[in-house]
Image: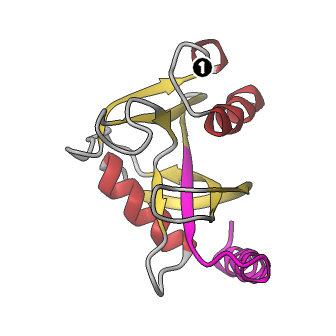
Amino acid sequence: MRPEALARIERRLRTEAHRDGINDFVVGVAVFRQRRLLVVRRVPDDYNGGLYELPGGGVESGETFADCAARELLEETGLRLRGITEFLGGIDYATRTKARVRKFSFVAEVEPGEVELAPGEHDDYAWIDANELEDLPMAPDMRASVRSLVHAI
């Protein structure tokens, strides 16, 4: 996706979220390799501990969604973002500290490299397809998102 197209999408998404009273954002990053989707497992003592999810995290003040995706992907997996190829959609949810957060997910291409998990945040990862999805513990909204991704490949 061209940077200007992504910037237009981000402006629209931020405007809609602000209109809905949401000012906190999270980005999820879907990475495929050989038709398999990367998921990471949160450490047991963290929020949603023991559950698998897409890599990603909170958008910092002044940060674009693309910059957040690149930063979070590198921090959590050691993979370097080559580019965002597709906007997948958004969901609203609550965290331990915030009543409403909007998560936007994107498909991304990454540079070649091996996954290196961030200690203290994730303790396992898997490259999955549709047949392996049901074997992994996930939050219901994450499972629905991941299911749509793995069935689309």
Residue 124 placement, left or right of 152: left
Q: Amino acid at mark 1?
A: Leu
Residue 151's x, y, as percent? 75, 26
For label 1, the residue is 133
The residue closer to the viewer here, 149 or 43, is: 43
The residue closer to the viewer here, 18 or 106, is: 18
| Residue that appears at 40% across and 59% down | 72
Q: Is residue 39 visible?
A: yes
Does 76 lie within the magenta span? no
User: Neighbour class for label 1 at 10 Å: few (<14), some, many (≥20)?
Assistant: some
Q: Secondary structure at mark 1?
A: helix
Q: In the picture shown, does residue 14 fall above or below 117?
A: below
Kindly indicate the quadrant of the structure image that contains residue 34.
top right
Residue 45's x, y, as percent? 28, 38
Kindly indicate the quadrant of the structure image that contains residue 90.
bottom right
The residue closer to the viewer here, 34 or 105, is: 105
| Residue that appears at 51% across and 56% down | 95
Q: Which residues are magenta?
A: 1-30
Does 9 lie within the magenta span? yes
